[in-house]
Image (tube, coloured by chain):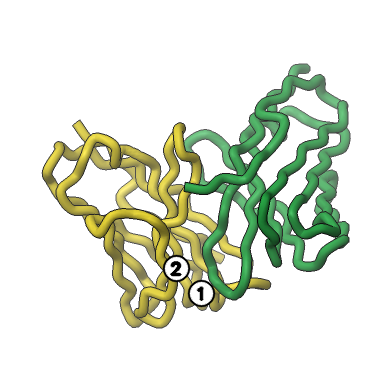
Chain colours: A yellow, B green
Amino acid sequence: KAGVTQTPRYLIKTRGQQVTLSCSPISGHRSVSWYQQTPGQGLQFLFEYFSETQRNKGNFPGRFSGRQFSNSRSEMNVSTLELGDSALYLCASSLAGGVFQPQHFGDGTRLSIL
Amino acid sequence: GQQLNQSPQSMFIQEGEDVSMNCTSSSIFNTWLWYKQDPGEGPVLLIALYKAGELTSNGRLTAQFGITRKDSFLNISASIPSDVGIYFCAGQDGTASKLTFGTGTRLQVTL
């Protein structure tokens, strides 16, 4: 069974640019969540999508946005990139989200801002 | 952002030894999860706990959901070199999918 697939694996951008990351969940999973991982802040929740709707949101600025398509694939967009956005961005999927539905992670996209 | 208190921060142990780590929170969670992350990879789910007091095993791993619902424990018995990595606890509350992660425990095993 294929796991969560994230593309690209690595990305280098410069300040002010924007970036789009992609996530394909495990087949049959309808909930997709995004997390940012940095050495200083650890793993922090960005947002969750279910049935093409954002269902939950973390404490990140509006520069971070996402969407989910009808096939449950999700994209995350970051606009006006800042140096502090350098991080590993992880996507996780679960059957329907919520308790009793453990999340399974992809290997992430490592974003570096120059 | 919020992070759960996880201890110890790092451990150096010899192959064959048992390992214990714990995670504490100031708030209650309905679900506790334990993940392991290897370099360059995403976290891999090890154990999920759904009820206060629950004790669950997965091979050499055993985890417990604290009865106060504010803590959880992970034990690894007879450690082997492939146990090396960073272990994270994560709590989930209510019906939301949001996971709150611990600060991580880095485990290193010497032969």
Q: Nearer the viewer, residue A103 or B82?
A: A103
From the top left corner, tell me how far across and down residue A112 is, in percent.
27, 36
Q: Which kind of residue does numbered mark 1 sit on?
A: His
User: Quadrant of residue B66 in the image?
Assistant: bottom right
From the image, tell me which residue sits under label 2: A32
Residue B97 relative to residue B85: left or right? left
Q: Which kind of residue does numbered mark 2 sit on?
A: Val
Q: Judge the density around disc 1: few (<14), some (14-19), many (≥20) Cα neighbours within 10 Å.
A: many
Is the C-beta separation of discs 1 and 2 under 8 Å?
Answer: yes
Chain bearing tag 1 is: A
Residue B30 relative to residue A23: left or right? right
Is B18 rendered above or below residue B74? above
Instruction: Give the CA distance from mark 1 to mark 2.
Output: 8 Å
From the top left corner, tell me how far across and down residue B91 is, in percent.
64, 57
- Residue at image position (56%, 45%) is B3
Residue B67 relative to residue B104: left or right? right
Q: Nearer the viewer, residue A9 or A37?
A: A37
Residue A105's tag is: none
Is A17 rendered above or below residue B109? below
From the image, tell me which residue sits under label 1: A29
From the top left corner, tell me how far across and down residue B105 is, in percent.
66, 34
Chain bearing tag 2 is: A
- Residue at image position (59%, 75%) is B95
- Residue at image position (64%, 48%) is B35
